[in-house]
Amino acid sequence: MSEYTNLLLLIVALLLALCIGFGVGLWQQRRRHSALIALLDGADNLESVLHEARTRMAKMRDVVGRVAPDIGAVAQASLEADGPVQQGLRNLLEHRLWIAKHAPTASYPQLRQAVTALRRSHEQIAAGLRKLESAGAELAEAARAVEEQEAREPAALRRTAAGDND
């Protein structure tokens, strides 16, 4: 009976080892899959933020156009420089190409590193958007103040569209 017991224990131990191995494999696969989903979601989120930045910059150009040219010149120049957004979109395209080429075979640490890089880019762009929003609020307030001041001025002192006085 001890031979049967030993054989039974051996079979149970092998089944247990097989189950543990299967469970570990499933856990690693699930972890890798989660990292891949986070990477794809991060790319989508970054793209959304970059397009939002472009839209907000276009709206800011309208606000800057309402203030005196000497006040808004620097802001206008910054808003015309669409380079950072374009560069962000190019970087995002590079990330997407990397995902398409390497994601199926990338290790979990490589996927996590890519996710971290996308999150860092997203945070930088989001911080820039917050600054842009703050600057936009200040410019809108300045434009409102200028419009109120102009409304209080006599018509003879108001600027014309050409920027000179009548």
Image (cartoon, rainbow, N blue to C red):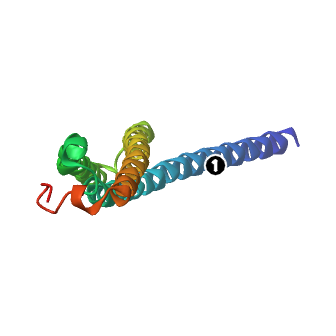
Packing grade of label 1 (10 A; few <14, some 14-19, many >=20) is few
- State the image coordinates of residue 31 (x, y, percent, origin top left): 54, 47
Q: Is residue 38 left or right of residue 20?
A: left
Amino acid at pointer 1: Gly
Tell me if residue 2 can be seen.
yes
At horizontal 40% and vertical 51% (from top left) the residue drawn is 145
- At mark 1, the secondary structure is helix
Query: Which residue is nearer to you in this view: 59 or 70?
Result: 70
Inspect this view and state whether residue 115 appears.
no
In the picture, the quarter occupied by the N terminus is top right
Q: Quadrant of residue 163?
A: bottom left
The residue under the point 12% across, 54% down is 164
Residue designated by label 1: 23
Quarter of the C terminus within the rendering: bottom left
- Determine whether, in the image, residue 23 is placed left or right of residue 121: right
- Which residue is located at x 21 percent, y 40 percent? 74
Residue 157: x and y in percent read 23, 55
Q: Is residue 162 above or below residue 87?
A: below
**Residue 29 in the image, given as x and y percentages of width and height:** 52, 51
Q: Is residue 163 above or below residue 91?
A: below
Of residues 112 and 70, the one drawn nearer to the viewer in this rendering = 70
